[in-house]
Image (spheres, rainbow, N blue to C red):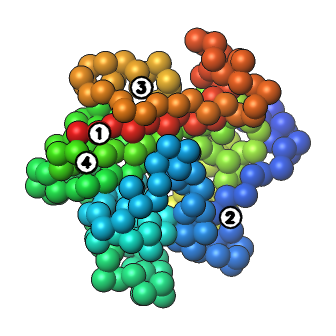
């Protein structure tokens, strides 16, 4: 690992203001992660609302939210008329925040937090009317298996709503709680990013938790970013072709309207698309 690379990146990083991030807001006592998610609930489905209504997505439905985090957004969906909603995540430490907010919002009777892996959903076939995967497809291990599992647990006519930012999105490395430089993953190696991130967060109150959340070691003892799968648009389409599932709705949202022409080009779209939006109906 080049210490020079870490020094350069830390120097460049000082030139960029950090985007608002829930981890930092929580540390500063502004709001919890769950509260931040609840407030952002409408934003998480705004791209679907260009085609579908909230009633179509939630009203009188049994819903699964995969990658719910602290489930604030799950609870936002709960108030949209669901019969029952399950928030699923692999991070057990979020459960207390989620259940506390459910009590505060009076939604405990409609909500359940489930600690499980999306590759093996703990539900029977044909259970759900709707599944939401908001900003989680880029995080799951084996996304093809997760999509297959979603198809299994959906009822006939059930719908999977998913959206994800491509890996080469300006903040697609998902390090913006500490690194504000856009497209940093294009200019620095993972080794440099890992060491820089660890150096920037280790003295924070939740620094070690952040490191554990984002970084693991492979069987050879080498550190790597385990919380993202480097999902690109090209990789996603390969997964969908192999899956055999048809998308009933698909859209690529550019970073800004003036980037729209670049966001349509085969290679550049990986850089200039803000969000990939898809809907699969069983």
Q: Residues within 10 Å of mark 1 (few under 14, many from 20)?
A: some
Q: Determine whether label 1 and label 4 are within 8 Å by CB.
A: yes
Viewer-nearest of discs 4 and 2: 4
Alpha-carbon distance for marks 3 and 4?
Answer: 21 Å
Question: Is 105 displayed left or right of 239 in the figure?
Answer: right
Judge by depth and name the residue closer to the eye, 73 or 195. 73
Mark toward the start of the polypeptide (1 vs 4): 4
Which quadrant is the N terminus positioned in?
top right
* Residue placed under numbered mark 4 in the picture: 158
Judge by depth and name the residue closer to the eye, 88 or 57. 57
Rendered residue at 49%/64% (across/down): 73
* Residue placed under numbered mark 2 in the picture: 24
Question: In the figure, residue 171 lies in which quadrant?
Answer: top right
Is residue 123 placed above or below 102 in the rendered structure?
Answer: above
Judge by depth and name the residue closer to the eye, 59 or 134. 59
* Residue placed under numbered mark 1 in the picture: 281
* Residue placed under numbered mark 3 in the picture: 236
Is residue 188 placed above or below 241 in the rendered structure?
Answer: below
Mark toward the start of the polypeptide (1 vs 3): 3
Rendered residue at 75%/45% (across/down): 180
Q: Is residue 74 visible?
A: yes
Viewer-nearest of discs 1 and 2: 1
Q: Does dot 3 land on a helix, a strand or a loop?
A: helix
Q: Is residue 166 visible?
A: no
Alpha-carbon distance for marks 4 and 2?
Answer: 37 Å
């Amino acid at each position: 690992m080049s210490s020079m690379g870490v020094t350069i990146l830390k120097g460049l990083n000082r030139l960029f203001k950090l985007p608002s991030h829930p981890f930092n807001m929580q540390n500063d006592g502004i709001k919890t992660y769950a509260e931040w998610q609840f407030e952002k609930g409408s934003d998480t489905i705004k791209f679907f609302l260009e085609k579908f209504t909230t009633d179509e997505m939630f009203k009188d439905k049994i819903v699964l939210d995969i990658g719910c985090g602290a489930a604030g957004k799950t609870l936002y969906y709960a108030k949209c008329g669901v019969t029952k909603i399950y928030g699923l995540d692999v991070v057990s430490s979020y459960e207390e925040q989620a259940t506390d907010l459910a009590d505060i919002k009076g939604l405990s009777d409609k909500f359940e937090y489930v600690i499980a892996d999306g590759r093996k959903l703990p539900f029977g076939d044909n259970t759900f009317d709707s599944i939401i995967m908001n900003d989680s497809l880029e995080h799951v291990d084996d996304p093809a298996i997760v999509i297959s599992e979603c198809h299994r647990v959906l009822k006939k006519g059930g719908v999977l709503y998913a959206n994800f930012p491509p890996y080469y999105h300006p903040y697609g490395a998902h390090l913006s709680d500490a690194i504000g430089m856009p497209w940093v993953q294009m200019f620095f190696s993972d080794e440099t990013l890992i060491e820089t991130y660890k150096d920037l967060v280790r003295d924070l109150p939740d620094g070690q938790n952040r490191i554990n959340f984002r970084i693991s070691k492979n069987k050879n003892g080498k550190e790597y970013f385990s919380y993202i799968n480097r999902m690109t648009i090209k990789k996603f389409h390969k997964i969908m072709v192999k899956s055999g599932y048809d998308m009933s709705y698909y859209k690529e949202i550019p970073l800004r309207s003036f980037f729209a022409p670049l966001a349509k080009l085969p290679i550049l779209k990986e850089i200039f698309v803000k969000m990939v939006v898809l809907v699969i109906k069983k």
